[in-house]
Image (tube, rainbow, N blue to C red):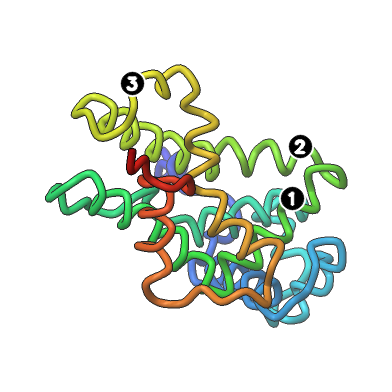
Amino acid sequence: MSGPDTSAVPRGRPRDAAVGHKVVETVLRLIAEGTPFGDLTMEGIAREAGVGKATLYRRWAGKDALLLDAMAAVDSPALPVLPGTSFRDDLVVAVETIRKRGLAKRDSAMLRNMLTQMHNNPELWRRYHGTVIAKRRAALARLLEHGIAIGAVRPELGSDLELLVDFVTGPMLTRTAFREDAPLEQGLSERVVDLILHGIAPGDDT
């Protein structure tokens, strides 16, 4: 008589999802507390998380792979459900989403750290941009295209949509990444949107 079929029995110890979550949360905490990416090490992360270094390497090939999982953990939908009452209201919600990310320690610290990786670790930056930034920009571009379609945005701007996305995201991202002393106060999103929609030139009273 043949023995029991063990071909479907997985080898080794099964991964504990709670351990993986704990490690990712540790990375996010360290980043939010101000630890630069360059100062993070697998050994230090393992120590802070209270796990063995071998546990980390069973799950992640190295620090970059772990950081990518940490990025995914803080990533949120590119845009929330838009009210649809007017193009201005929808644009305010989109800009408000950027403002709230700037107020969130994890999101803003992740962004500032990733900006340093454009030169220090271009591959990590490329993957971050491709998985996080590009998705957010595409959602905003679709909203702006809708604005063009309904006549709320000048149609000729459709040929320069990338610049238009920069124009909308720029104020909040500048304050988040380059002006930490600048406030991100309530009502700022409405002010930014109205400035975008009405411009800075005085009206023609002639």
| Tag in front: 1 or 3 | 3
1 and 2 marks in contact (CB < 8 Å): yes
Say which residue label 2 marks.
Answer: 123
Q: Secondary structure at mark 2?
A: helix
Say which residue label 3 marks.
Answer: 155
Label 3 neighbour load within 10 Å: few <14, some 14-19, many 20+:
few
Q: Which numbered circle lies on residue 90? A: none
Quadrant in the picture for residue 118: top right
Q: 48 or 125, which is in the foreground?
A: 125
Tell me the kind of residue under disc 2: Glu
Decide: is 116 above or below 104.
Answer: above
Dot 1 or dot 3: first in sequence order is 1
| Left or right: where 183 falls relative to 63 | left
Tell me the kind of residue under disc 3: Pro
Q: Secondary structure at mark 3?
A: helix
Q: Residue at the spot x=84%, y=66% of the render?
A: 41
Q: Residue at the spot x=73%, y=81% of the render?
A: 48
Q: Which numbered circle lies on residue 64? A: 1
The picture places residue 143, in percent across and down from the top left corner, at 31, 37
Answer yes or no: is residue 47 visible. Answer: yes
